[in-house]
Amino acid sequence: QVQLVQSGGGSVQAGGSLTLSCAASKYTYSSDCMGWFRQAPGKEREAIAVISPGATVPHWVDSGKGRFTISRDNDKNTLYLQMDSLKPEDTAMYYCAARSGRVCATTFRDFGYWGQGTQVIVSS
């Protein structure tokens, strides 16, 4: 069973920072494409970035590129999303996701496994 457990999130002032984490199984972490998505009210869930197991650089999709950073803790099988210079437009529900295999995708429908989601609220 693929299980993704998220933590982090919360409320922050514009310009502040938050770090989200996604703990996965060892197999998922080392074998599957993983990514971060977000969904704002009334909008479709969209990819922020995805990364394959062997990649050194994530594939960035969202405007968070340049402000956000993805890192990994191999000992904890955990994927992180460091968000800096947050803007009110970043307010959304944030999800960690995984799909089977090394080949990545950027459409949420291509990801079969999801964390529980965590709310990020950025106030001006």
Image (cartoon, rainbow, N blue to C red):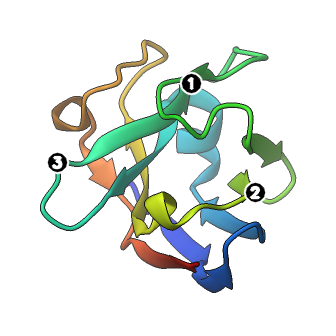
Tell me what residue is drawn at x 35 percent, y 19 percent: 105
Which residue is outermost to the bottom? Answer: 11
Which quadrant, please, contains the N terminus? Answer: bottom left
Taking 22 as reference, is 59 above or below it? above
Answer whether residue 71 is visible to the viewer in this image: yes
Which quadrant, please, contains the C terminus? Answer: bottom right
Of tags 1 and 2, the one toward the viewer is 2
CA–CA distance between discs 3 and 2? Answer: 23 Å
Mark 2 belongs to which amino acid? Ser
Taking 37 as reference, is 99 above or below it? above
CA–CA distance between discs 1 and 2? Answer: 17 Å
Helix, strand or loop status at disc 2: loop
Q: Would you name the residue on which mark 3 appears?
A: 44
For the residue carrying disc 2, how many other residues have a C-alpha within 10 Å: few (<14), some (14-19), or many (20+)? Answer: some
Q: Would you name the residue on which mark 1 appears?
A: 60
**Earlier sequence position, callout 1 versus callout 3:** 3
Helix, strand or loop status at disc 3: loop
Q: Where is residue 89 in the image (x, y as percent from the top left)?
A: 45, 59
Task: Describe residue 95's horizontal placement relative to residue 88 as left or right.
Answer: left
Q: Position of residue 90 (x, y in %)?
A: 49, 59
Tell me what residue is drawn at x 24 percent, y 38 percent: 108
For the residue carrying disc 3, how many other residues have a C-alpha within 10 Å: few (<14), some (14-19), or many (20+)? Answer: few
**Earlier sequence position, callout 1 versus callout 2:** 1
Q: Would you name the residue on which mark 2 appears?
A: 85
For the residue carrying disc 1, how many other residues have a C-alpha within 10 Å: few (<14), some (14-19), or many (20+)? Answer: many
Mark 3 belongs to which amino acid? Glu
Mark 1 belongs to which amino acid? Trp
Q: Where is residue 101 in the image (x, y as percent from the top left)?
A: 42, 21
Q: Do the residues labelled 3 and 2 touch (CB within 8 Å)?
A: no
